Image (cartoon, coloured by chain):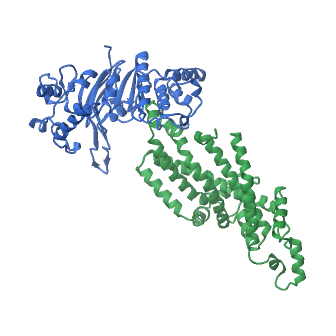
Amino acid sequence: MTRLIGQRLLAMVPLLLIVSFLTFSLTALLPGDPADLILGDRATAEQYEMVHERLGLDQPFLVRYVQWLEGAVRGDLGTSFFNSVRVVDAVVQRMPATLSLTLASVLISVVVGLGAGVAAALRPRSWIDRLATFGATIGQAIPNFWFGLILVSVFAVALNWFPATGYVPFKDSPGQWLRSITLPALALGLSTSAAIARQVRSAMVGVLQQDYIRAARAQGLSALRVTFKHALKNALVPVITVLSFQVTVLLGGALIVEQVFAINGIGSLAIAAVRQQDIPMIQGIVLVLVLVVMLVQLVTDILYGLINPKARPS
Amino acid sequence: MSETLLDIKDLRVSYGGRSFLGLRSTGFEAVKGASLSIRAGETLGLVGESGSGKSSIANTLLGLVPAASGTMRFNGTDLAALDTHYPPEVRRNIQAVFQDPYSSLNPSMTVEQIVTEPLKIHTSMSRAERRERAAELLRLVNLPETHLPRFPNEFSGGQRQRIAIAAALALQPKLIVLDEPVSALDVSTQNQIINLLYERRDALGIAYLLIAHDLALVHHISDRIAVMYLGHIVEEGPADRVYHRPAHPYTKALLDAVPLLDPARQRARRAARRAAPASELPRMAEAGCPYRNRCAFAMERCHKDVPTSLDVSGGGTAQCFLVEGGTAGVSGLKEKVTT
């Protein structure tokens, strides 16, 4: 297992290099000159030159890339073009909100998805199965920002159970933190719950027809043990696949849901950076998000190895 | 011989007979009043084509499917009345080996976990004791104990079936239900598994209910053979008698389906079969003998009356009017015709 983790970590290095080069070149291809935004309409050619020199834009593309990469390896992603804030500091400051939102919705979707999927699979074609399938179809069709607005109007405005907007950091008050992310996490987790429920249902139905389930039942194992120990563990393999790419979807969805709930996470930082053509900030955010996604993939691979002996390197 | 271990009387099993919005559907009846018995240490071969209800009997006996009516006495307890809620002492004494060893072993459990799981549920053995027993069980099925920490995907079909047998032997049950234990395996491997089952039975005194469709194989290992057709046990008797002198036309048809080594005899038999009347859909049989539409010997009364189990000369019973008066049934007829 340690060898597997080591291999995967090593494999991340070339991938990160490629991604960093791509993000760096994409931002270099952005139309317009960041100096326009800094200097306004009436700037002289000398002023432009000065700004370009200060921002390092007078250097050739590859030189700039290598310099940026050198910094990135040391954990320095440069400084914002606009307010001389270090990119790393900005990202680190905004990350907890986005990550707690994402993780909370992962948790919600795993609990809801597993519960609904298993309940549906145990009694195929029963009313509970139909209800779960219907709910999953609706859940996947509803956009998360719209569901977020509905949640706000019901649970925040009408019932006043949760705050409508804002985010309270965990270290300030765990209770308030939980209240502040409940509605956004529900809004974000809806479609993933639905995707997981569908996957769990079909995988469980398939596994429950296997002879080892018959054998386990014939041996006199309790229904609970057959369902959770023999069936669910084998049904989880496709579920983990879905979950791993759903985390990426959730991370992207979090950027939108953050806007609905006015949460100062990575989303608002990224949108502001794009609007201002704050190139170092965009590059930094993309690189960090890619790193998060790659770590999720690593965790997925480890989980595969734990659950499915066939996936273990021999 | 020793006392009766399992006595099934008039067992009926049906599927899908649920009421839906007040409308009752009777569903499909897979077993229509079957009776059979197995003595301790005896092997009963249960044969018949697919859909004849063999596996339904196995599933009902294993408590996976409830019995609709009838009785199943196992060691004095009527299992049919328990509605699949068997007490542990019944469960531990009836174990099963299924057809497909690729599907019957949990892929995420090691061989040791698979083989010791019955011990975990039904005994108070310690971890070390279970491990020792697991090694012993692997030796019983001729596998090295070094296989214990491995996973099923590392084994061939024959090896997997040995592991399944080891798990079935773990609790030293009185009865093992073998549901087509070799039909998914290569012919060479089939032989090994059959011989293994043979040896273990004689060494441990276990009774087998062997379900298969290959009569030659069943004859090789069974003491008695029961033949099923559309949910009925149409013939039952000592293995040699059923195999060499079948009384029911269906048993004879099954035996004739085994190819003969001599091409000339095979040709002659095929010609005779083609001369027989064409069969209708077997499921159409409702009144009269269930086999009448496919039977080459069907008489007028076969379309009106249902034959009951009648004694056959040479042992056993058959549900066929040809057997009336204790004759040899269809085998007796054939002799009269040929001589």
Considering depth in this image, is A302 or A259 the residue closer to the camera? Answer: A302
Q: Which chain is painted in green?
A: A
Question: Is any atom of residue A89 visible in this view?
Answer: no
Chain with colour blue in the figure: B
* Residue at horizontal 71 percent and vertical 40 percent from the top: A2
Residue A75 location, quadrant: bottom right
Quarter occupied by residue A28: bottom right
Image coordinates of residue A172 in percent, x first then y, are: 76, 54
Residue B334 percent location from the top left of the image: 15, 28
In this rendering, position of residue B288 left or right of residue B63:
left
> Is residue B190 left or right of B107 when viewed as pictured?
left
Along the line of sight, which residue is nearer the eye, A163 or A79?
A79
**How many numbered discs?**
0
* Above or below, comparing residue A63 to residue B333 in the picture: below
Depth order, front residue of B128/B78: B128
Q: Quadrant of the C terminus of chain A?
A: top right
Q: Residue furthest top?
A: B1
Farthest bottom residue in view: A42
Residue lying farthest to the front in this orientation: B264
Q: Is residue A185 visible?
A: yes
State whether residue A3 is above or below residue B165. Answer: below
Residue at x 57% of width, y 56% of height: A192
Judge by depth and name the residue closer to the eye, A87 or B310. Answer: B310
List x then y, in percent, for residue A116. 51, 50
Q: Residue at x 44, y 30 (%)?
A: B189
Residue most extreme to the left? B300
Q: Position of residue B288 (x, y in %)?
A: 15, 38
Viewport quadrant of the N terminus of chain A: top right
